[in-house]
Image (cartoon, helix red, strand yellow):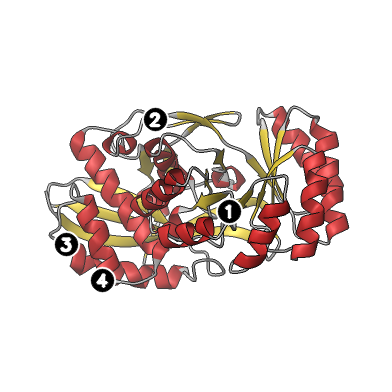
């Protein structure tokens, strides 16, 4: 089996409403789908979501990277997926979103060729797990109302976006806690918005509100301050923007800057890069989290296969598709409230609606 062609497509999905975090407001979802076809006629799909402020990737750079990689991938065997991963990293530095899309498509094909779901191809077995739902940064009463709505839809875990000032962030979490009661698990994500002094104070206050984890409270490279915070915090500190690959994970863990790491496929370069991070984190006996960018169910399903391949994770944040009115895919992960299930289908188990895509 050999790769015959590699193509990139623009996928558009309208959001139900704007989504706000500490440093950005997202009003629509434009992402890149990667299609790989073999000489045998097997087609694989992957998603490459741009995140300019995190990975530096845009739709334009992703399309250019895929175009650059295409002739170097043609003729390779997609069932030799570690070899493909090595080729990507040899031929092109950075461009991790494009690599994530390519590797998802490769592993989709490899699973289809073997007649196995991708996670089984990678030795995984966990097919059902609980995801949180993320509350967009807003006024406390608005976030409280949204929290009630999604708990009513069956979610048992919420992630609360924060972004300062300190007093307002505390109001937000108090409002959400009052709205949903003590049984709902809460996590918070500051997206680098706090100072060390603010974070130390807030960590103690948030612990009293039953918050179970703080994600990326300080700037990405403030590892010394993060180590100080971790030493004083009664709540685990998990890093997202600080960790792109296994080397970053190792540095953050050895320097005592965190209790855990958030893997995102677009940062890691795809499932295999995510596996490398996961193995480092598990070896350190630290906490493991999976997150997502602004992406469709194709990307969410791919990330779910990584969760399964790593035998589950401590925190799962795979909800981006829930913010979209409509998306150009069918199938993929199934949901029952916050419970996520991976379909028992060969490959990733996602069908792409090609007539809704635009070739790049």
Residue, disc 4 = 91
**Left or right: residue 212 compared with residue 122:** right
Residue, disc 2 = 343
Indicate the position of residue 222 as horizontal and vertical percent values.
63, 68
**Left or right: residue 72 compared with residue 206:** left
> Which dot marks residue 192?
none
User: Mark 2: which secondary structure?
Assistant: loop
Mark in the foreground, 3 or 4: 4
Indicate the position of residue 199 as horizontal and vertical percent values.
76, 58
Residue, disc 1 = 14
Q: CA distance from mark 2 to mark 4?
A: 34 Å
Q: Kindly indicate whether the residue at mark 4 contacts the one at mark 1 (C-beta within 8 angstroms).
A: no
Q: CA distance from mark 1 to mark 2?
A: 25 Å
Q: CA distance from mark 3 to mark 2?
A: 29 Å
Q: Mark 1 or mark 4: which comes first in sequence?
A: 1
Residue, disc 3 = 74
Q: Is residue 192 above or below residue 259?
A: below
Residue at horizontal 59 percent and vertical 54 percent from the top: 258
Q: Is residue 330 above or below residue 255?
A: above
Q: Kindly indicate whether the residue at mark 2 contacts the one at mark 3 (C-beta within 8 angstroms).
A: no
Mark in the foreground, 3 or 1: 3
User: Mark 1: which secondary structure?
Assistant: strand
Q: Mark 3 or mark 4: which comes first in sequence?
A: 3
- Visible in this render: residue 284? yes
The residue carrying pointer 3 sits among few (fewer than 14), some (14 to 19) or many (20 or more) residues within 10 Å by Cα, namely some
Indicate the position of residue 58 as horizontal and vertical percent values.
48, 70
Q: CA distance from mark 3 to mark 1?
A: 34 Å
Mark in the foreground, 1 or 2: 2
The residue carrying pointer 2 sits among few (fewer than 14), some (14 to 19) or many (20 or more) residues within 10 Å by Cα, namely some
Q: Mark 2 or mark 4: which comes first in sequence?
A: 4
Mark in the foreground, 1 or 4: 4
């Amino acid at each position: 089996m050999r790769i015959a062609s590699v193509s990139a497509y623009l996928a558009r999905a309208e959001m139900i409403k704007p989504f706000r975090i500490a440093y950005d407001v997202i009003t629509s979802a434009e992402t890149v789908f990667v299609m790989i076809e073999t000489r045998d006629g097997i087609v694989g799909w992957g998603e490459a979501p741009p995140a300019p402020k995190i990975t530096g990737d845009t739709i334009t750079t992703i399309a250019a990277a895929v175009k650059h990689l295409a002739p170097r991938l043609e003729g390779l065997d997609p069932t030799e997926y570690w070899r493909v991963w090595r080729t990507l990293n040899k031929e092109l530095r950075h461009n991790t979103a494009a690599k994530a899309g390519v590797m998802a498509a490769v592993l989709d094909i490899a699973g289809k060729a073997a007649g196995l779901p991708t996670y089984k191809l990678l030795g995984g077995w966990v097919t059902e797990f609980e995801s949180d739902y993320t509350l967009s940064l807003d006024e406390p009463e608005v976030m409280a109302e949204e929290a009630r709505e999604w708990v009513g839809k069956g979610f048992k875990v919420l992630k609360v976006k924060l972004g300062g000032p300190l007093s307002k962030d505390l109001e937000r979490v108090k409002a959400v806690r009052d709205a949903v009661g003590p049984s709902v698990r809460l996590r918070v994500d500051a997206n680098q918005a706090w100072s060390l002094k603010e974070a130390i104070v807030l960590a103690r206050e948030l612990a009293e509100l039953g918050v179970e984890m703080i994600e990326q409270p300080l700037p990405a490279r403030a590892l010394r301050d993060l180590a100080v915070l971790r030493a004083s915090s009664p709540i685990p500190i998990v890093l997202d923007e600080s960790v792109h690959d296994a080397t970053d994970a190792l540095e953050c863990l050895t320097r005592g800057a965190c209790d855990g790491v958030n893997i995102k496929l677009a940062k890691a370069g795809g499932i295999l890069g995510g596996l490398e991070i996961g193995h480092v984190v598990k070896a350190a006996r630290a906490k493991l989290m999976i997150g997502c960018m602004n992406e469709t169910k194709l990307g969410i399903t791919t990330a779910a296969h990584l969760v399964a391949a790593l035998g589950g994770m401590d925190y799962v944040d795979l909800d981006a598709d829930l913010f979209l009115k409509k998306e150009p895919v069918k199938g993929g992960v199934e949901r029952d409230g916050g419970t996520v299930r991976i379909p028992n289908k060969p490959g990733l188990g996602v069908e792409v609606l090609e007539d809704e895509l635009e070739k790049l």
